[in-house]
Image (cartoon, rainbow, N blue to C red):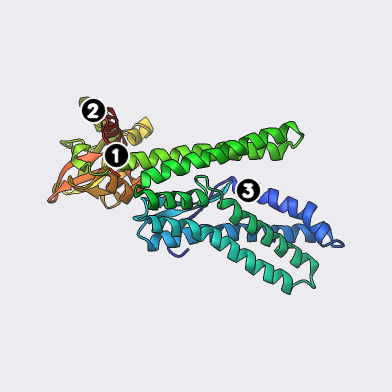
Amino acid sequence: MFGIEVGFNWSLIFIFALVTWTLATNILPITAPGYGAVLYWVIAAVGAVLFYASLLAHELSHAIVARRNGVKVAGITLWLFGGVSRLEGEPKSARAEALIAAVGPLTSFVVAGVAFVLAYATSANALLSGVLAWLTFVNVVLGLFNLVPAFPLDGGRILSSLLWWRSGSRQRGVHNAVRVGRVFAYLMIAGGVLELFLGGGISGIWMAFLGWFLLQAAASEEAGSVVRTLLRSVPVSAAMTSPVVTLPDWVTVEQFLESVAPNHSFTTYPVHEPSGKLTGVVRLSDLVRIPSGERGQKHLIDVARPIAEVPVTNPREDLAALIQRIGAGLDQRVLVFDNGTLVGIVSPADVARVLTVRQTIGAAPRP
């Protein structure tokens, strides 16, 4: 959709059932009495679909504005807590981050406005008007809740962008915004526990769990910001493993595991055709999972990741820029080329080693 991959988590089944059940049994029979049970359930299911559509509109607005501001969008995932736009990298300015964050709640309010107008226009049909009125309410709540200044909510990112603009440092902005967000998260946990003791039951547990989730997300956001700051100005050459052992792609998996793997400590190997041209990359963890009875028949080229799908870099690129550019692609390893010659490989373990060294020597983060 708009060139953006949209994924759905299995937890949506639970939320879909919960929303449909709530509408069909608790809301529509009150706002529009006199209809049959089957019709309530059908309209409730339609309402649940519209609810998901409004969540998708919220996340799409984030993704579209992010892309227009130079931030790569890996995709969107709808799940238990609503949705998340998977952005790879950071906005280049406080203004860009504010725009990316603020457009989500704004979209929810626009959807609420449209639903309100439609509810008014269909007031003669109590059932249809009722589900649209509910959709109006839900989107207003969604917009307001996302403005709470706590990561990973949009309000936390808006606060972070304001503090970034004021201090001139994104890391400082994130740090201070996380501190504010923790206060709200602890208040939610305390409120949930109190409600539980007062007989609130499920709603108290849900509020406390949501507060805990905000705490974990805030810690993850701050850790990611620190990592990106530490790796800024560190070249790929400082992290890459070199020299690289390449293998003929016609070697069988059995030959590799018996004769090659025991003699090297590497876990990733580029493979090449007879002419020397690289054709792909194999990983030890993938090869050992192949059933022993098939290892003699399968060649490395049969199980290699095609070379066209492997991310590449050069020794002079900043590690922070590399991570921002490829995101989760680092898990599949990155080949390092210098003037067309393969000179190294970068893995998550290589990046972790550099981080450990930088933290140990007390590398001062650049503002």
Q: In whole angstroms, how far apart are the C-alphas of marks 3 and 1? A: 44 Å
* N-term-proximal mark, 2 vs 1: 2
Q: How many marks?
A: 3
* Residue 287 horizontal/vertical position (percent): 33, 35
Which of the 4 image quadrants contains residue 45?
bottom right
Instruction: Check disc 1 and give the amino acid type.
Output: Pro
Q: Which residue is mark 2?
A: 265
- Are there few (<14), some (14-19), or many (20+) residues within 10 Å of tag 3? few
Image height of 117 relative to 275, above or below:
below
* N-term-proximal mark, 3 vs 1: 3
Q: Residue furthest front?
A: 166
Which of the 4 image quadrants contains residue 258?
top left
- Are there few (<14), some (14-19), or many (20+) residues within 10 Å of tag 1? some
Residue ID at (70%, 64%): 132
**Is the residue under label 1 in contact with that under label 3 (CB below 8 Å)?**
no
Can see residue 209?
no
Instruction: Check disc 3 and give the amino acid type.
Output: Ile
* Residue 177 horizontal/vertical position (percent): 46, 44
Residue 13's label in the rendered image is 3
Secondary structure under tag 2 reads loop
- Which quadrant is home to the C terminus? top left
- Are there few (<14), some (14-19), or many (20+) residues within 10 Å of tag 2? few
